[in-house]
Image (cartoon, rainbow, N blue to C red):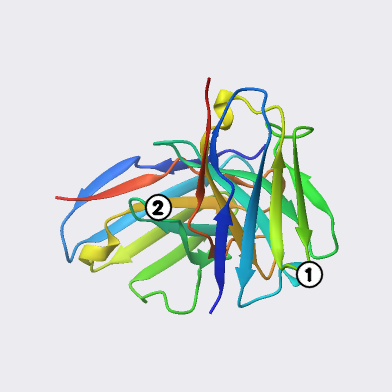
Amino acid sequence: EVQLVETGGGLIQPGGSLRLSCAASGFTVSSEYMTWVRQAPGKGLEWVSIIYSDGRTYFADSVKGRFTISRDNSKNTLYLQMNSLRAEDTAVYYCVGAPNAYFFDYWGQGTLVTVSS
Amino acid sequence: DIQMTQSPSSVSASVGDRVTITCRASQDISNRLAWYQQRPGKAPKLLIYSISSLLSGVPSRFSGSGSGTDFTLTISGLQPEDFATYYCQQANSFPRTFGQGTKLEIK
């Protein structure tokens, strides 16, 4: 059974940094297309970033230059390093896996990031 | 960026009803269109990909259709567990974008 478990969320001040982790089981992170999607409180879904199985990465303009996506194959874990955080980054962050680069098959339960002073 | 516009934003229906949700893309997205269901407090769940392909395990009362820029999600014979928010998503180009969501409520 595929399972994704996100950790690392919490309350952080504007300008701060946070690293989210997503531990995967039931499939291999390095072989899949791994994505982060976020959802601000009471709002819709926003795509954040993707890492391809070949290592290519793409980002939403709203986070480009501030966020990085990476994975540790030995730990079968995906990461999202978030720097220079802003109030508008407040959201539940979902880790998502898929066998292709297009759609989002497997979702974690999400982790809440709150950026506030 | 490709804009995805869903209508209606909310709809009320009864168990057993047939409901149709539409999604319009700001440009041709070929067949790169998916639908997700999100229940309150839960992660979204992929229902349909490539316009009309049902993910394994998704009930056959869900169906998708359309082409180019106009797409529909139809739920035939609503069940209590179907009352949720539905999102369309395009995967034709980056950034991937979602519709604003359609909340399906019990009448």
Using the rendered image of the protein, determine whether residue B58 is visible from the camera's viewpoint.
yes
**How far across and how far down the image is residue A11, in percent?**
52, 33
Q: Is residue B44 above or below residue A11?
A: below
Query: In the rendered structure, which amino acid carries the disc numbered 1?
Result: Ser
Of residues B52 and B67, the one drawn nearer to the viewer in this rendering? B52
Q: Nearer the viewer, mark 2 or mark 1?
A: 1
Residue name at image x 69 percent, y 47 percent: A80
- Would you call the spot at circle 1 few (<14 residues within 10 Å), some (14-19), or many (20 or more)? few
Query: In the rendered structure, which amino acid carries the disc numbered 2?
Result: Tyr
Do the residues bearing badges 2 and 1 touch, measured as CB atoms within 8 Å?
A: no
Q: Which residue is mark 1?
A: A74
Displayed quadrant of residue A16: top right
Which structural element holds mark 1?
Answer: loop
Residue sitting farthest toward the top: A117
Chain under numbered label 2: B
Horizontal arrangement in the rendering, residue B46 relative to residue B13 (left or right): right
Q: Which mark is residue B59?
A: none
Q: Which residue is mark 2?
A: B86
Chain under numbered label 1: A
Of residues A41 and B101, the one drawn nearer to the viewer in this rendering? A41
Horizontal arrangement in the rendering, residue A101 relative to residue A86 (left or right): right
Compute the Cα span from label 2 to label 1.
Answer: 36 Å
Of residues A112 and B12, the one drawn nearer to the viewer in this rendering? A112
Q: How many marks?
A: 2
Using the rendered image of the protein, determine whether residue A101 is visible from the camera's viewpoint.
no
Residue name at image x 30 percent, y 42 percent: B10
**How far across and how far down the image is residue A46, in percent?**
56, 42
**How far across and how far down the image is residue A35, in percent?**
66, 55
**How far across and how far down the image is residue B86, in percent?**
40, 52
Displayed quadrant of residue B8: top left
